[in-house]
């Protein structure tokens, strides 16, 4: 995967400059910026599929009454097989669904380590200060930070694999509250994405998809240490269902 990124140094530079030169809100609101970022994520190997978008108030564009994850879930039950990096298909979706958010399916090419925002910022500073190779990182205005990594794949011993839930499983991970490891069978919103509520709430890149995906274990210690230090100081997301199961 790293080699795939490494072969696009010119594109990486242009994308980095473009990201630095625009405010996050502009990337979410501008159609050209949206499509550019979605295609950059796909070119980096992140499989995408359309997702719901915010409706007035805190509502969701889906027809589910009382949607528990408004604007944060795929529009199709077949999202795992639908997710793709095909440029033409993504352009078609973006054109036909101009308000849609997009999700990226984890556990195929990449995983996502999802932590509370304060813990994530602290860990990111520590990792960069120690010279650790950190890959793409996104911030969500609902108080989360997403670290994109290589996938753990499918271990030979299935007892060593667990699906995504609100906090990590199995029980041995309970000492690290707030950490979600999105792997096989899960997804996250990919920037740029709009969130329900006040105008401008979004998911945006802190470090773009031009950065090579690291081994998740190289980030895990810093992330779990920060999560432990910030336990109890973040909003309570205990009742949030993620990913949404229809």
Image (cartoon, helix red, strand yellow):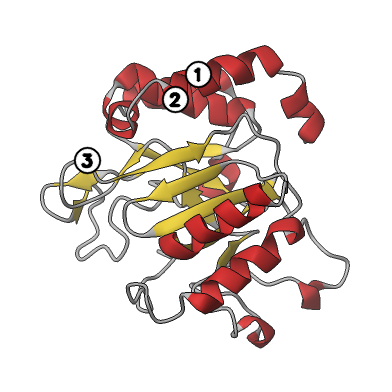
Position above or below: 149 against 11: below
Q: Name the residue under label 1.
A: 17
Left or right for 173, reference 243 = right
State the residue lying farthest toward the front.
129
Q: Nearer the viewer, residue 198 or 14?
A: 14
* Observer-nearest of 78 and 149: 149
In the picture of the structure, the residue carrying the numbered disc 2 is: 20
Q: Which residue is drawn at 69% across and 67% down?
A: 221
Q: Are marks 3 and 1 in contact (CB under 8 Å)?
A: no
Labels 3 and 2: the sequence-earlier one: 2
Q: Residue at x 61, y 48 (%)?
A: 148
Say how many tags the image has: 3
Q: Residue at x 76, y 19 (%)?
A: 7
Question: Quarter of the image containing the N terminus?
Answer: top right
Give the percent coordinates (x, y) of residue 79: 51, 47
How far, Cα to Cα, is label 1 from label 2? 5 Å
Alpha-carbon neighbours of circle 3 within 10 Å: few (<14), some, or many (≥20)?
Answer: some
Depth order, front residue of 42/214 = 214
Q: Nearer the viewer, residue 59 or 44?
A: 44
Element assignment for label 2: helix
| Distance from Cα at disc 3 to Cα at disc 2 | 18 Å
Q: Residue 12: horizontal and vertical position, in percent? A: 62, 20
Q: Residue 147 carries which label?
A: none
Whole-percent x, y for residue 218 in the image: 75, 57
Q: CB of mark 3 within 8 Å of CB of mark 2?
A: no
Q: Name the residue under label 3.
A: 200
Q: Earlier in the sequence, mark 3 or mark 1?
A: 1
Examine the image and state in which quarter residue 240 appears. Answer: bottom left
* SS under mark 1: helix
Can I make out residue 244 in this image?
no
Q: Is residue 10 above or below residue 26?
A: above
């Amino acid at each position: 995967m790293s080699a795939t990124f490494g072969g696009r140094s010119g594109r990486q530079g242009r994308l980095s400059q473009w990201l630095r030169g625009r405010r996050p809100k502009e990337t979410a609101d501008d159609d050209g910026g949206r499509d550019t970022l979605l295609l950059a994520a796909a070119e980096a190997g992140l499989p995408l599929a359309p997702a719901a978008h915010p409706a007035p108030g805190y509502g969701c564009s889906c027809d589910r009454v009382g949607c528990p994850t408004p604007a944060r879930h795929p529009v199709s039950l077949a999202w795992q097989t639908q997710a793709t990096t095909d440029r033409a298909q993504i352009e078609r979706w973006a054109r036909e669904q101009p308000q849609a958010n997009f999700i990226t399916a984890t556990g195929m090419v990449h995983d996502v380590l999802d932590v509370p925002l304060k813990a994530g910022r602290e860990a990111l500073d520590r990792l960069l200060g120690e010279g650790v190779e950190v890959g793409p990182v996104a911030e969500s205005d609902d108080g989360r930070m997403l670290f994109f990594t290589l996938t753990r794949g499918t271990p030979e011993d299935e007892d060593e694999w667990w699906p995504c839930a609100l906090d990590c499983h199995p029980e041995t991970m309970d000492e690290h509250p707030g950490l979600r490891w999105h792997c096989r069978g899960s997804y996250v919103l990919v920037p740029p994405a709009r969130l329900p509520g006040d105008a401008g709430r979004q998911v945006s890149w802190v470090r773009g998809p031009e950065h090579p995906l690291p081994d998740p274990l190289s980030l895990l210690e810093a992330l779990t240490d920060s999560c432990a230090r910030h336990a109890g100081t973040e909003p309570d997301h205990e009742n949030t269902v993620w990913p949404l199961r229809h």
